[in-house]
Amino acid sequence: MSKPLRAALLAAAIASAPAFAADKVKIGFLSTLSGPGAGLGVDIRDGFQLAVKSLGGKVGGLPAEVIVADDAQNPDTAKQTTEKFLKKDKVDFMTGIVFSNLMLAVGKPVFDSHTFYISANAGPSQYAGADCNPYFFNVAWQNDNLHEAVGKYVNDQGFKNVVLLAPNYPGGKDAMSGFKRFYKGKVAEEIYTKMGQLDYAAELAQVRATKPDALFFFLPGGMGINFVKQFVAAGLSKDVRLFAPGFSADEDVIKAVGAPMLGLFNSSHWAHDMDNAANKKFVADFQKEYGRLPSLYASQGYDAALLIDAAVRDSKGKLEDKAAVKKALEAAKFASVRGAFKFNSNHYPVQDYYLRLIRQDGQGRVTNKTMGTIFTQHADAYVGECKMK
């Protein structure tokens, strides 16, 4: 028998060999755990680890090894850590990235290695549309979605002259696109800030000069905290109504800003007062574990872990059988804190989006209250461009 024929037969045998159950599951958790965006990464991490703890330290019945690393909101750091996760640690799944520019920076090596990425936050339009990939699943939303919901609400309320403000990065650009997709009034200004910016004196002066009747802002983490404080201190809240996606009006921002957040309407796909058994357990367990109310970021980290758990369980732990794992991920048979959960054909959720109002609750806490539904079973705008290979 010739060497080429032997090699071909060996390759065929390996390809047809049955996949065996793994003895453990390795998860690379890379997120922003330092700098202005750290609060978001910390919440995703805490939600993820809480879910793993609730599962007895296992996912899909197998021992879970969660390797946590800080990307410091730096694309080069993210790429270096991703290379370590893939080549040295040989992780079975990756998750945790907050910001879309970092997700876009690490996507190719992750997908090329046939490693499943379960996004607990970043939802760039590229991966929802033309660059969709069978190894990418987003358990949160597509970047535009929460902004689309605010745009629809602001439009329905009859505001005619709005200023938009967001950071100059892919997620910020998706925010602007999403808002304008459903808001049909006049956009007086589109203001892009630097990522990580904390002083907004120039931008607030520009808003004052423009004299809008409303301002929509998307500034995640410490950026949003500083902006709201400065907006109110400048006296602009007397004349300009402030609107935000849930990212900029969640428990992390509320805790840091306090009473100036009262009366702010925002959009979300999740809220801590959602009335389902999985959510009630999650909120109670999170408060017991960490001594604070969870944010939407924490809820997404929690759901990401539960999705991985379901995929490992339903593929019977045969993690080398990529087709079986993919099928199990697509089925998404887990009890989401949002209630019923399903993926679209591009591996992004189809789900409801809600209106929330920041107010004082019965315990005197400044927090969000769900006021109604803006979108029902809403899909993203890019799914038609996705030709999943």
Image (cartoon, rainbow, N blue to C red):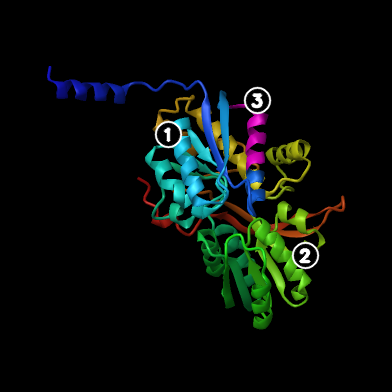
- Judged left or right of residue 348, residue 385 is left
| Quadrant assignment for the C terminus | top left
Residue found at x 71% / y 39%: 282
Q: Position of residue 12 (x, y in %)?
A: 25, 24
**Residue 116 falls inside the magenta stretch:** no
Task: Determine the CA span between mark 1 and mark 3.
Answer: 28 Å
Query: Which badge, 1 or 2, is on the more N-terminal residue?
Result: 1
Task: Determine the CA span between mark 3 and mark 2.
Answer: 40 Å
Dot 2 corresponds to which residue? Answer: 263
Callout 3 secondary element? loop
Tell me, yes or no, whether the two marked residues, 1 and 3, touch with CB atoms within 8 Å.
Answer: no
| Quadrant assignment for the N terminus | top left
Query: Which badge, 1 or 3, is on the more N-terminal residue?
Result: 3
> Residue 56 — which label?
3
Q: What amino acid type should be assigned to the residue bearing mark 2?
A: Gly
Dot 1 corresponds to which residue? Answer: 87
Residue found at x 67% / y 57%: 222
Closer to viewer: mark 1 or mark 2: 1
Q: Position of residue 278 (x, y in %)?
A: 68, 38
Task: Determine the CA span between mark 1 and mark 2.
Answer: 49 Å
Q: What amino acid type should be assigned to the residue bearing mark 3?
A: Gly
> Residue 167 — which label?
none
Q: Position of residue 32 (x, y in %)?
A: 59, 47
- Judged left or right of residue 44, residue 112 is left
Q: Residue reaching furthest top? A: 1
Callout 1 secondary element? helix
* Span highlighted in magenta in the image: 45-58
Label 3 environment density (alpha carbons within 10 Å; few <14, some 14–19, many ≥20): few
> From what the image shows, is residue 251 above or below residue 284?
below
